[in-house]
Image (cartoon, rainbow, N blue to C red):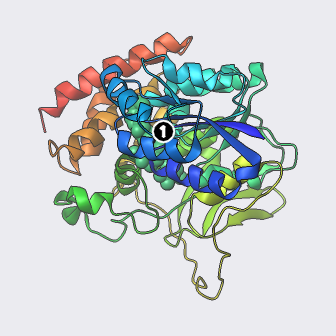
């Protein structure tokens, strides 16, 4: 049995992960689960999976949760709290697999801790890789950790790589990586229509059901921008060999275009349980609960190129990937502030790229020599973006 720690078990990826674990109970033992605020859902998960540890970083929320768990059927679960508790659970010897499914920069340090501890690391938390880049990749290399992407596009690319491929290597003979994108809910709207987009509209993705932050990122296409940066680190590819292709049906999850003219693609119904099951079982395969792809129901696959005018976040992401240093960390932090501000009703949908661009233009980019440099850039950017928010 493999011991599993799920960081962010109460979110969309966390729930899909537990669905796959439930289907394959004989293969896994759940060692630790974590949540930020959704204690009701965490309690249900503890009662069902009986983990050794449940982690809630906030001490007050954890204290309340401790009282409830002691009265429940999960009384043997130990509740941990405090900032470092997430890092502690990823490094426990009984943990073989860490699923990094916290949203945003909050997942950075526990993800790095899992990489440093040499675990099998299943990465959904793309922001952690975008902001720490080479630091995370070299932690994986030095500790012998096995990094497997859960993001559907990167998981697809991984499946299209030559056998024996490891994340961080550059496979021979690749012309380019083709990241597919649904285009989000506003693909066919005009620029004017985007001005009056509501929070509900931005969170209603046509093909995937996801957390609110990534749903807004998909609507602005910043999600695809972050994924271009993510792909650059995972597959050691420069920006000009990573192409974004809009494919509204979300059936082809991404493709590798080889120099001999072969294009390898991974297809499937749009359901995160497929990449999660793939990465959990790798290098083997097991059930995910996802139905077989019906080609007769999906016999119209179309493709188009994205417009930078409609989706300036995509352009900004490519630019920061060219600049490197702390530029991707600044992009990510400015985006987190912009998305939170939009979700709080403080700025409009079309202000999101404007706030990010203004913050980027007024930030100093430096080389990344340590995690402290990245954390400083993250903190300074949040301050600056919050200040500029008042201008919109
Ligand atoms: P979500 O909002 O549904 O869940 C986020 C999880 O993180 C929750 O368990 C929450 O309790 C926890 N969390 C939030 N803030 C925290 C904090 N400050 N400290 C500790 N825990 C915290 O998000 P999601 O849609 O599951 O996405 C998670 C990650 O996976 C994101 O990085 C996202 O980009 C990536 N991802 C998601 C999908 C998807 O289909 N949902 C697909 C690809 C990649
Ligand atoms: Mg994705």
| Left or right of 1 in this view: 288 | left
SS assignment at label 1: loop
Image x and y of residue 71, in percent: 41, 35
Q: Is residue 346 visible?
A: yes
Looking at the rendered image, the quarter that the C terminus falls into is top left
Q: Is mark 1 within 8 Å of ligand 1?
A: yes
Image x and y of residue 269, in percent: 60, 70
> Can you say whether 266 is above or below 372 in the image?
below
| Left or right of 77 in this view: 314 | left
Q: Residue at x 54, y 48 (%)?
A: 48
Residue nearer the viewer, 216 or 389: 216
Residue nearer the viewer, 340 or 233: 340
Image x and y of residue 299, in percent: 61, 85
| Left or right of 319 in this view: 228 | right
Q: Residue at x 16, y 44 (%)?
A: 347
Image x and y of residue 53, in percent: 55, 29
Looking at the rendered image, the quarter that the N terminus falls into is top right
| Left or right of 340 in this view: 135 | right
> Can you say whether 375 is above or below 64 in the image?
above
Q: Residue at x 20, y 59 (%)?
A: 198
Q: Where does label 1 land, which residue?
A: 8
Which residue sits furthest bottom?
296
Q: Residue at x 24, y 60 (%)?
A: 200
């Amino acid at each position: 049995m493999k011991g599993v720690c799920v960081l962010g078990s109460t979110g969309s990826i966390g729930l899909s992960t537990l669905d796959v674990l439930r289907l394959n109970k004989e293969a896994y033992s759940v060692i630790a689960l974590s949540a930020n605020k959704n204690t009701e859902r965490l309690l249900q998960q503890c009662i069902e999976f009986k983990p050794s540890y449940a982690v809630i970083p906030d001490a007050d929320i954890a204290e309340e949760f401790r009282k409830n768990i002691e009265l429940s059927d999960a009384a043997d679960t130990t509740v941990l709290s405090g900032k470092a508790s997430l890092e502690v659970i990823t490094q426990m010897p009984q943990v073989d697999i860490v699923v990094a499914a916290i949203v945003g920069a909050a997942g950075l340090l526990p993800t790095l801790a899992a990489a440093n501890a040499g675990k099998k690391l299943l990465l959904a938390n793309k922001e952690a890789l975008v902001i720490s880049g080479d630091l995370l990749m070299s932690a994986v290399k030095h500790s012998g950790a096995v990094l497997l992407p859960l993001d559907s596009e990167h998981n697809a690319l991984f499946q299209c790589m030559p056998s024996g491929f490891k994340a961080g290597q550059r496979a021979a003979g690749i012309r380019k990586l083709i990241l597919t994108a649904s285009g989000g809910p506003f693909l066919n709207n005009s620029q004017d229509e985007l001005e009056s987009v509501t929070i509900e509209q931005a969170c209603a993705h046509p093909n995937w059901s996801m957390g609110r932050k990534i749903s807004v990122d998909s609507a602005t296409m910043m999600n695809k921008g972050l994924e271009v940066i993510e792909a650059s680190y995972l597959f050691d590819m420069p920006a000009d060999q990573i192409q974004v292709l809009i494919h509204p049906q979300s059936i082809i999850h991404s493709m590798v275009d080889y120099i001999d003219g072969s294009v390898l693609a991974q297809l499937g119904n749009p359901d995160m349980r497929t990449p999660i099951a793939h990465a959990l079982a790798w290098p083997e395969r097991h059930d995910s609960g996802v139905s077989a792809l019906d080609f007769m129901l999906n016999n119209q696959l179309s493709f188009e190129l994205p417009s930078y005018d409609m989706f300036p976040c995509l352009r900004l992401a490519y630019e920061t990937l060219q600049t490197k240093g702390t530029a991707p960390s600044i992009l990510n932090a400015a985006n987190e502030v912009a998305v939170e501000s939009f979700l709080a009703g403080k700025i409009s949908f079309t202000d999101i790229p404007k706030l990010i661009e203004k913050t980027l233009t007024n930030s100093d980019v430096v080389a990344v020599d340590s995690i402290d440099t990245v954390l400083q850039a993250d903190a300074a950017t949040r301050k600056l973006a919050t200040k500029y928010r008042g201008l919109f």
